[in-house]
Each structure stands twice: as C-alpha cells, then as structure tokens.
Image (cartoon, helix red, strand yellow):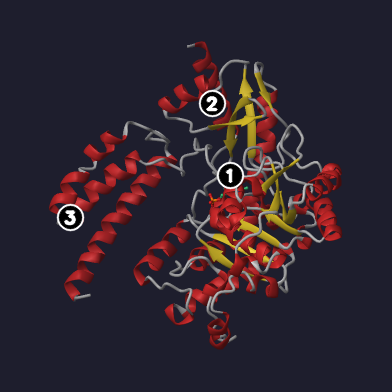
Amino acid sequence: MTRRVIDDFLLAAEVTLAELVDSLHSSAEQRDKVVATPPLAEAVRALRIDEWLRDGGMDAPALGVFLREYLRRSTHLHDQGFMAHQVAVPHYAAALGDLVSGMTNNGMAIYEMGPPAVALERAMLAWLRGFCGFTEGSGVLVHGGSIANLTALLAARAAGCPEAWRKGVPAELCVLVPAASHYSMARAVAIAGMGEQGAVPLPVDELGVLRVEELPATLAEVRQRGRRPIALVANACATATGLYDPIADVAAFCRSEGLWLHVDGCHGASALLSPRHRHLLRGVELADSLVWDAHKMLRTSALCAAVLYRDAAAAGRTFQQDAKYFRCDVDAERPNLFPLAIECTKTALGLKLFLTVAHLGEQGLAEHVASAYERTSRFHDLIEARSGFRCAYRPQSNILCFRYGDGDQEKLRRPLLAEGRFHIGSTMLGDRRWLRIVVMNDATDDATIVAMLDAIERAATR
Ligand SMILES: *Cc1c(COP(=O)(O)O)cnc(C)c1O
C-alpha cells in the first residue's frame, strides 16, 4: 500500500466508525425501526447500488453517505426490541477483531499463514473444551454451526465406517436424528452421502425432546431393517423451543451400544459457562463431539463455530486424504489446522472470540448467558399472567414460544414487524404456529416485554 492509500484508509475508517457509533446511539435510544423489510428494489435504489457498480470512485464522504443509508436500513440487533433470531448482539471487540482479520487476511489454516491467529484458535478451543470436559480432545473453529455439524458428522463417519472415504458410503449407513433437530443436521447427513433417508428420526415428545426410554426399541428396529447407525444426535438445546435433550441418559445409551454421540450445542452449549445452568448439559463430557456457536450466546460476531472432540485421534481421522503429506507436515510446535477442517482458506476466527473473552472476562460472559436465561424465565411468568396469552412450556434457556388467542399468530406478527418496534419470530410446534422470542440483548427487560404484549393486543383488535 502506498502512503496515499493508507491515508485514505484512515479517512474511510474514521467515517465508518462515526457512522457505526451514530447507529449504536440510535439503537440504544430506539430512534429507528428495529426491523424494516421493504421490497429489495427499494434498497437497490436508496443505496444507489447500480450507480456505484457502474462508476466506482467512492471516497470517504461518499462512503459516509452510503453507510448512513445502509445502517439505517439494517436490522438493529443492538435495539432492545430485537428478539427474533439466535444471533449475538456482538461486543465491539469482536467486530474490531473482524476488521483486523479482514485487513491482515491471514488464511490461517496453514501455520505460516498466521501464527498468532493459530495460537489464538488453539487457545480458544482449549478454553471451550475446558467447559465440556474434553480436556484430552481436540477441535477446530469453522464458519458456522451448519458446517460444524457437517464436520463432526464426517468424523463420526470416519470412526464408524472408515472405508467410506475411499469407497463411498454403503447404502445401509445412517444416523439417528431427533425430529426436532436443526435442518442443517439432516442436510449434513445427506451431504455425507447417506441420503436424506439416512437421517432416521428419533422419537420425541410433543415439545420435541428426545424420549430416551424409547431409544432401545428404536435402535433394535432400525438394525432389524438392515440399517447401520454410526451416530446419534442430541440437541442442547433445540432451535425451535430452546429445550435440552437429557444428555447423560443418551450418552449412557450410546456408550452401551457403541454409537458415536454428537451433541448439537450450537445455541445452548454456552450454558456450560454459568454454574447455575451447566446442569442442563449434564453428561456432555461423555459425548464424542460437540458443536458450539460463539456467534450465538458468546457475544461474538458471525461466524464463529467450534467443533470439539473428546478424542483427538478420532478427530484426526476425519479427512483421510493425502495422509502421507499430512504426516510429514506435522510439527507440534507449528500446527496446521487444515487437516481438521473442510475450509482451506480460513478466517482468523479465534481472534474475535479471544477479544470478546478478554474484554468481558469469563465471568462477564457467564453472567450474560445466565441473565438471558433467567430473564426469559421471568418473561414466561409475565406472559402467562396476562389474560389471553399462553406459553407453550416453561423455558430452560432464552428461547420461548407463546401465543395470543387461538387465531393465526402470523396475523399478529406481521403488523408488529410493520410497526418496527419489536422484531419477534414464529415457529411450528406440532401442527400449530407459535410466536417465538429469543432473548439475546442485555437491554431487553420486563418493560420491553410488557410493551410488546401491548402491541400484540393492539394488533389483535385491529
Ligand atoms: C443455529 C443452530 C444451527 C445452525 O448454526 P449456524 O451457525 O446458523 O449455521 C444448528 N443447530 C442448532 C441447534 C442451532 O441452534
């Protein structure tokens, strides 16, 4: 970079920071809508996308104008009315990590492409493994929970059917997956060559929680049909409800049957940080793999997902390609990460998680998780106490499904989104649609919820 370009960078960065700070103030004071979804063409026009693509030449002042419009139209996670999706309200340290990672662009899956980034990834993986008890294990940071699930499943496949890597997947191979699992799980099974039918649904109760007592009969029946299960999946917690499967009991079953236990903790593994909530994952130390998204409950900007393994040797067998090359390349003091990951060029994902923990402290993050879980339990009581409202269950995490009256809940949600003060979601439980909130923002409090219930009542009478 010439001196001139570096000066331009400073100017552009100053403008960017100023616009971001203004947008954060705006969110804190709820000056803009938390969410707005005008048709796509409107954003194309307002952001002058076609003109910029044709002409180029954006300078710092023009960048400021562009960013103002971009930020105003974005979904505002820092607004206390944001309760719709399981995406972290990021700590600024994580976002600054993204900036540094972007500018250094160290594609660090190879050690020489970013020694400090590799050191941070290793440190953060060890930090996470400390909470789930995989102290002798290993792991890798990847770009999102969906890829994390796929990566772990490939490790399970390598353990249960090592020949699959060279010869392809035998038709009888399958994975036992609770019906309430995130869609990325069934997708991973299909991508791993077992077909959609390779994801054999496990029996769950009316709220989607695994019925452990029915596992022996289900497994016997699956084997009877000539299928060969290589792994069983448990949720910690399930995406729709935020409810946890009983991991200790499932783990005992998997041990006795020689099945690889994969725990999908994308959302809920962070409860391990909170002494008051880690019991929800009791038994997780007996699992073979655990996936954990830092960009959900650990205040880290997307994406930052961990794949964690109890047994380092089993993890190392996942991708058996070019084994000889990998071996001669192994240097414990200068480790390469690509043997464990699908990705080749990899972002310095450990940096932003490290900076988040370094700023908030383990204690601060534990408090963030505990507070979100405890407020959601209080919100449950608030909602239940109000006439016409009903919750689907007592929440275990920061995800809660509820409804108002017996009508179409989407007819309540849509005007709420149009109003733009509250961003909430909805989900199907069984054959009914429920409204769904995920309490991600530290600023979301009782008053937010009361105002939201008022708004829903107004929408219902309109
Ligand atoms: C969010 C989620 C996923 C998907 O993770 P992404 O990071 O969005 O790809 C998978 N499983 C569960 C249980 C989740 O909550």
> Circle 3 sits on which residue?
58
Residue that badge 2 annotates: 451
User: What is the x, y in percent for residue 144?
Assistant: 52, 56
Image quadrant assignment for residue 406: top right
Q: CA distance from mark 2 to mark 1?
A: 33 Å
Residue lying at the far top in this picture: please name it: 461
Return the residue nearer the eye: 247 or 21. Answer: 247
Q: Residues within 10 Å of mark 2 (few under 14, many from 20)?
A: some
Real-space CA distance between mark 2 and mark 3, rounded to the nearest whole angstrom: 42 Å
Q: Nearer the viewer, residue 79 or 326?
A: 326
Left/right placement of residue 407 relative to residue 263 reads left
Residue sitting at x 69%, y 53%: 174
Residue picked out by circle 1: 183
Q: Is residue 7 left or right of residue 277?
A: left
Q: Looking at the picture, which amino acid does disc 3 mark?
A: Met
- Could you tell me residue 276's position as x and y percent? 75, 51
Quarter placement of the N terminus: bottom left
Going 61% across and 45% down the picture, which residue do you hit? 182
Which tag, 2 or 3, sits closer to the chain's start?
3
How far apart are the alpha carbons under marks 3 and 1? 40 Å
Q: In the displayed structure, does residue 230 sit left or right of residue 447? A: right
Residue kind at label 1, given as amino acid type: Tyr
Residue 269 is left or right of residue 104, and the answer is right
The vertical placement of 32 against 132, above or below, is: above
Secondary element type, mark 1: helix
Foreground disc of the pair 2, 1 = 1
- Residue located 14% across and 50% down the image: 54
Q: Amino acid at mark 2?
A: Ala
Q: Quadrant of residue 86?
A: top right
Q: Secondary structure at mark 3?
A: loop
